[in-house]
Image (cartoon, rainbow, N blue to C red):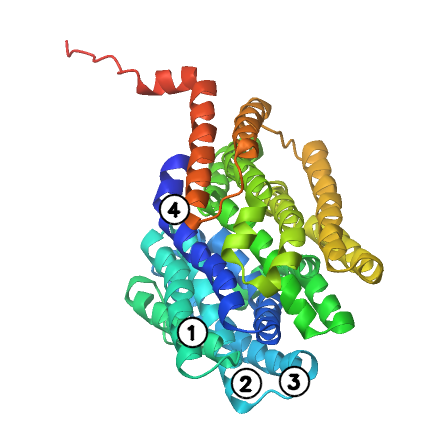
Amino acid sequence: MLLKHTLLYLPAQFVGPLFQLLAMIVWTHVVDEHTLGVITLITATHELLQIGFLAWWSQYALRFLGRYQDASDGPHFYRTENAVLLASVMLQSAAVVGILLLVIAPGAGTGLLLATIAYVITRSLNLYIGERARARQQIRVYTIQQVFGPSVGFIVGLVLIKLIGQSPEWPLAGYALAQLIAALIVLPWIGWSPRLWPIDREIVVHALRYGLPLIVGGALGWVGLNASRFIISQFSGVAAAGLFAVGYGLGQRAAAVAAMLVTAAAFPLAVKSIEQGGSQAGMRQLATNSALLVAILAPSLAGIIMLRTEIVHLLIAAPFQAVTLAILPLSTLAGAIRNFRAHFGDQVFLLQNRTRWMMAIAAIDASTTVVLSVLFLPLWGLTSVAGATVLAALAAAIVSFSIGFTKFGLRLPVSHLLRIALATIAMAALLRIFPEARTLAVLAAHVAAGAAVYFGALALLYAPSLMRMLRPRPQHSGA
């Protein structure tokens, strides 16, 4: 079931994040450090606003939407949903304008303000519709929300840059237009109501009780992920933040892309398991999910570390290369640790309705990131800030897994992890003997060779299981 659903979600989990990665690379060739810094700070700000004003409701919908499917309960949910969404985008719009004018770009003109507001509103709708679609397993709707905005928005933004100029409002406007179209396309397929009133106060109270710890935890998680960018901007300038953003963003995005290939289908299956079979069934499903997650994260991390020099020299513009080369492996490691925690360790607390634990764990990540970044930056420069995020991610992960193992019976799939580790080592050993690629074609060949060795080694290590799966089942003749 997990593998089937993972394959169905795969286009959405691959194409959209791939274009986000591609955008980060292309922007280094078409805009300067300041413009890139403004874009990344605005998108990071929206992530925080999304957490503060809408993620609580999105997580509630993902966990409990299945309880509002009949004709009597559906309208109550839809009216309440509309009111929450309207309030959320209004608050986010006001907040992002204030942050833009006070922190990111004090001299921002009307064009940048309007583009930022449009980006925030449409991105919020895309993210929410996508989570709602996951809850109902509407894979087509989810795919459109994940793919259309990042891909078409990137292309439109690139065209606007080429035709009009390098100002940051044009990429944001391109994304906003594509995200709006994506939301409008799926309206006929999702249940919704045009009404805003009356809201169901019982639903709101339940959602807040479930989601408020997630707001605090999510905000703290955002601090852990993004505080380093703002600290660098504050102490070293927006251009330095732009330089840091490339390597840091690529590493975090690469880890997230790898994780998202398998996580869209995983959590809903864990929810189904715990609802139908109880706590231990949910923990077993989480362990199964984690094996597939590590099978993607481990080779991705090892491949980026082994091929980092050729990746940076071939893909990143010259002014960004030196910093990116130093930061990329550290940011990828931090991203891998955070994604493993988020999609395995922390999901225990979501399944057990113990979301307050997530606040404490996120606080460890956030506080460690801030303190170490402030201490390290003046001493050792931009690279040390990436190192600080690794230490912070590791500290939070240790606490998360310790609680999961001791209090909720979480277990690691040790036999799977050992086989994945052996296959990853075999891949890394091959990549180590390759000379640095001088062309994209050779880089692609190195990636393909590494992937072939990795999956070949896995096939050998899982040969008995594969033979059982492929063995024809006996046919029972009728009596």
- Disc tally is 4
Pointer 3 local density, CA inside 10 Å: few below 14, some 14–19, many at least 20: some
What's the residue at 69%, 61% (across, down)?
216
Tag 3–tag 2 contact (CB < 8 Å): yes
Q: CA distance from mark 3 to mark 4?
A: 39 Å
Q: Earlier in the sequence, mark 1 or mark 2?
A: 2
Q: CA distance from mark 1 to mark 2?
A: 16 Å
Which type of secondary structure does the marked residue at label 1 adopt? Answer: helix
Label 1 sits on residue: 157
Q: Position of residue 424 (x, y in %)?
A: 55, 30
> Which label belongs to residue 10?
4
Q: Amino acid at mark 3?
A: Leu
Which type of secondary structure does the marked residue at label 2 adopt? Answer: helix
* Image quadrant in which the C terminus is located: top left
Label 3 sits on residue: 101
Q: Position of residue 36 (x, y in %)?
A: 57, 71
Pointer 4 local density, CA inside 10 Å: few below 14, some 14–19, many at least 20: some
Q: Amino acid at mark 4?
A: Leu
What's the residue at 34%, 44% (across, down)?
8
Q: Earlier in the sequence, mark 4 or mark 1?
A: 4
Q: Amino acid at mark 2?
A: Leu
Q: CA distance from mark 4 to mark 1?
A: 25 Å
What's the residue at 61%, 43% (across, down)?
352
Q: Position of residue 320 (x, y in %)?
A: 61, 62
Q: Earlier in the sequence, mark 4 or mark 2?
A: 4
Q: Quadrant of residue 142?
A: bottom left
Q: Seen in the image, is 139 located left or right of residue 358?
A: left
Q: Amino acid at mark 1?
A: Gly
Which type of secondary structure does the marked residue at label 3 adopt? Answer: helix
Front: mark 1 or 2: 1
